[in-house]
Amino acid sequence: MKLGSWPSIVGIVLFGILGASTVSKLIPLGDGLAGTLGLSPAEFGWLISLIAVPAAILALPSGVVVDRFGPRAVLITAAAVGFTANVIYWFAPSVLFFQIARLLEGAAIVHFYTAGPALLMANPNERRRGASMTLWATYPPVGTAVGLALGGFFAEGGDWRQLFVAHGALYLVIGLVGLLQPRIERPESSRSASVRQRVLDLRNAYSRPPLLLLAFANFLVIGLGVGANVVFPEYFARLHELPIVTVSGMLALATLAMVVGSLCAGVALSRGFRTNVLFAAVATLGIVAGFFSFYPELPYAAHSLAVGVWFFTSGAAMALLMASLPVVAEPQRRGAAAALCNQTGALAVFVNPPLWLSVAAGGGWVPLVALQAAGWSVAVAAIWPVIAMSQRDAPGSAAAKSA
């Protein structure tokens, strides 16, 4: 494949989609894992969230690895690690082996998320580079939908471990796609300096209040999405007495509304709407949609619609946060700013599954509504002053003025 060609770009985006599907694929297997391994809801939540541990630890080191060996080699190696994890899942006799496989998957996808954008940004065509990064931004909802659909399909079968055969095959295929990607050489002189500069940039980025608030809002929004994805399948299957495969299919389609939400947010920003005002409006819609998503007296069709609106708001909120990142990040420290947001996202993935599953285990719907409403409200309080603080801290910045 040629650097910057559409086949190369699509192949790279597929790495992101496969990584996101890895996060969500276990969610529909709650009953199967509980019956086989004796997991409680909280323990199942921790198993899901273990995938975020490598992301939290390896976010910066993965950048150094990509600089040292190149994104192509890292993508291929990470695919091999993901394939190995699925082999371990297939033979795993105990919870410990499932935990080891989950950690290996986390190590694989954190390198996907670093090496993929690095290869896309090496595109010499500036216009196509922008389009490719926009396409890359769609991998979370698409990958989440793929993972839920795959997990739901095999959860209803006689042997849910077949999921790991299918997912392992996808890792094998994506590894072959990686072999076709172009090689990108990294300058030798930049490698040792890169490590020191990354540490310095990260320290300076952590000291900026606007960026800290944005990262905190990012933590909350991602946490809401992860928590909802973990709770929705069992909640709707039990409430409407439907097979998990049916509910997982509905959720997979509803998750794709995040793509529409992201695009709508981009259009609104291009027409001059203020980010914090848009975010407040999206959060208000999210709270309303969250209420109707969990309200037990509605028919299944109405719940499906409410969930679709909820995911629409989630996608729009994520797009607004990412659009704010260049505004709050100093030009020379944008890499460190992105690393901070990536790490808070990983922390959200780690913390929220056991929290939401524990709340859902209580059986009531009101605590779930209160939890999501609180998350949206605090996120609005965090994001509202971000743009103003950035303008105050950097009055000469063109980015700040244009915001």
Image (tube, rainbow, N blue to C red):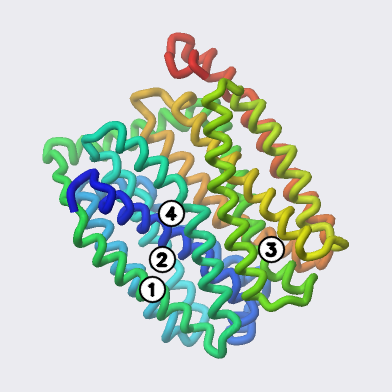
Q: Is residue 138 visible?
A: yes
What amino acid is labelled 3 in the image?
Answer: Phe
Look at discs 4 and 3 and give the one toward the viewer: 3
In x, y percent, where is residue 390? 52, 19
Q: How would you rate the neighbour count of disc 3 (Cα within 10 Å): few for under 14, some for 14-19, many for 20 or more?
A: many
Q: Is residue 61 visible?
A: no
The numbered mark at residue 55 is 4
**Residue, disc 2:** 105
**Residue, disc 1:** 85
Secondary structure found at label 1: helix
Real-space CA distance between mark 4 and mark 3, rounded to the nearest whole angstrom: 24 Å
**Residue, disc 3:** 232
Q: How would you rate the neighbour count of disc 4 (Cα within 10 Å): few for under 14, some for 14-19, many for 20 or more?
A: many
Is residue 168 or residue 360 the one in the foreground? 168
Real-space CA distance between mark 1 and mark 4, rounded to the nearest whole angstrom: 16 Å
Between discs 4 and 2, the one toward the N terminus: 4
The numbered mark at residue 261 is none
In x, y percent, where is residue 314? 62, 46
222 lies left or right of 16:
right
Between discs 4 and 3, the one toward the N terminus: 4
Determine contact: label 1, label 2, CB under 8 Å.
Answer: yes
Q: How would you rate the neighbour count of disc 2 (Cα within 10 Å): few for under 14, some for 14-19, many for 20 or more?
A: many
Q: Residue at x 41, y 32 (%)?
A: 203
Determine contact: label 3, label 1, CB under 8 Å.
Answer: no
